[in-house]
Image (cartoon, coloured by chain):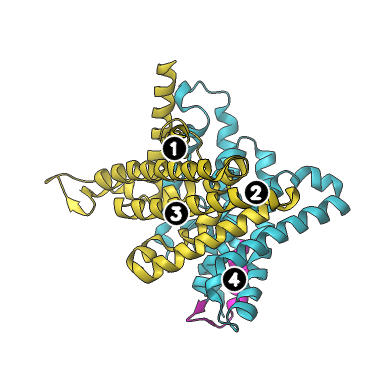
Chain colours: A yellow, B cyan
Amino acid sequence: MIKEFLKGIVKENPTFVLALGLCPTLAVSISVINGIGMGIAATFVLIGSNIIIALIKNSIPERVRIPCYIVVIATFVTITELTMKAYSPALDRALGIYVPLIVVNCIVLGRAEAFASKNSVMKSLLDGIGMGVGFTLALILISVIREFFGAGRILGLNIVKGFEPAFVLGMPSGALLVIGLLLGFFNLLKERKK
Amino acid sequence: MNIAAFLTIFISAVFINNVILSRFLGLCSFIAISKQTRPALAMSLAVMFVTTMSSIITWFIYRFLLIPFNMTYLRTISFILVIATFVQFVEMVIRKIAPPMYRFFGIYLPLITVNCAVLGVAVLNSDMFFIKNKAVAGSFIYSAFQGVCVGLGYTLAMLLMSAIRERLELCDVPKPVKDFPLGFIIASIMSLGFMGFNGFRF
């Protein structure tokens, strides 16, 4: 059981190993706080949709399963969207259109199709938590690098004095560069291990 | 409604806020299908068609269904369902009436349902061209035009990327960065170039 939870964090990390759901990862990783907010929102959607899909998997007709999954996922995304608007409008403004776009995040649909539709509720719940935590950790890693080198801050606090930040890391171009180098780095680690 | 507004939408959607290189929408398909020019072009044309049509359809849904009944909170669900249904429908029609075209586009169409660019442009339109749940003047034309321009921006980035990657096939690159990571690094350099268009703002 614990295996289902742990695999999402390292062995099948959604961002670095499966390379899924990169659009929001790159767009919101400009600061750590946005990264954490997005991670929590996606984790909630993953857990909720995994549970519901595992519950109703036997009554969904094979041919229309994808639209069914999308409806379930979109419901949870709407819940997240409205909750975020009500309780942390600042975060909602910072994440912008990327909150509704969790619907088309390949991680959520990918786990529904590949895991929750074949496994029990308990396993799907753990898989959802694991994948969500893995996604959040990846987001934190990317956003720490970008916020530190791009603005000289972490979580909005100035850490180093007299450090000239490279503004390009805060731009879209920097996001693509960081993810490219990180993916290369993890590939290198994998090859060393063999 | 005037020419300047259209020009602003065009330059902003194609160059300054390019869907892929600055908004990161549709990144998965951008990295996965840009290895050769022909499939990249097929995918881009399919995306352009779907972004345009879904901009039009979702505008009607938003204006005549969601706003009058005060249900704008159902935006995400209704948009994604309409897009998924529309894409499925187009796939069926193409398969029936134009088999050669189906072989050209076929496998890319289902992928478009989960392409963030399509839902992204629908959401952007409803954010930009509706103020306090009221359509701004000319909002329908602007929405449709933005759909076309986002598709054009996608096509531009896709064609540039696939041309670069076709040449890279022959190069000797370090093994860990082969394929995916190198794709991102190239995209980063392209995005740096596109940042130059920021000065275009007017």
Badge 1 element: helix
Residue A106, percent from left and from top: 55, 47
Which mark is in front, 2 or 4?
A: 2
* The N terminus of chain B: image quadrant: bottom right
Q: Nearer the viewer, mark 3 or mark 2?
A: 2
Give the residue at mark 4.
B143
B92 sits left or right of B2 in the view: right
Residue at the extreme left of the image, as rendered: A161
Task: Name the amino acid type tagged 1.
Answer: Phe
Q: Residue at x 77, y 43 (%)?
A: B104
Q: Which mark is residue A5?
A: 1
- Tell me the distance, in whole angstroms, between the alpha carbons under discs 1 and 3: 15 Å
Discs 4 and 1 lie in a common subunit = no
Q: Which residue is mark 2?
A: A57
Nearest to viewer (mark 1 / mark 3): 1
Using the numbered discs, state the Cα–Cα distance from disc 2 to disc 4 in whole angstroms.
38 Å
Secondary structure beneath label 2: helix
Q: Name the residue tied to disc 3.
A: A44
Does residue A138 appear left or right of residue A66 in this picture? left
Residue type highlighted by circle 4:
Ser
Q: Chain of mark 4?
A: B
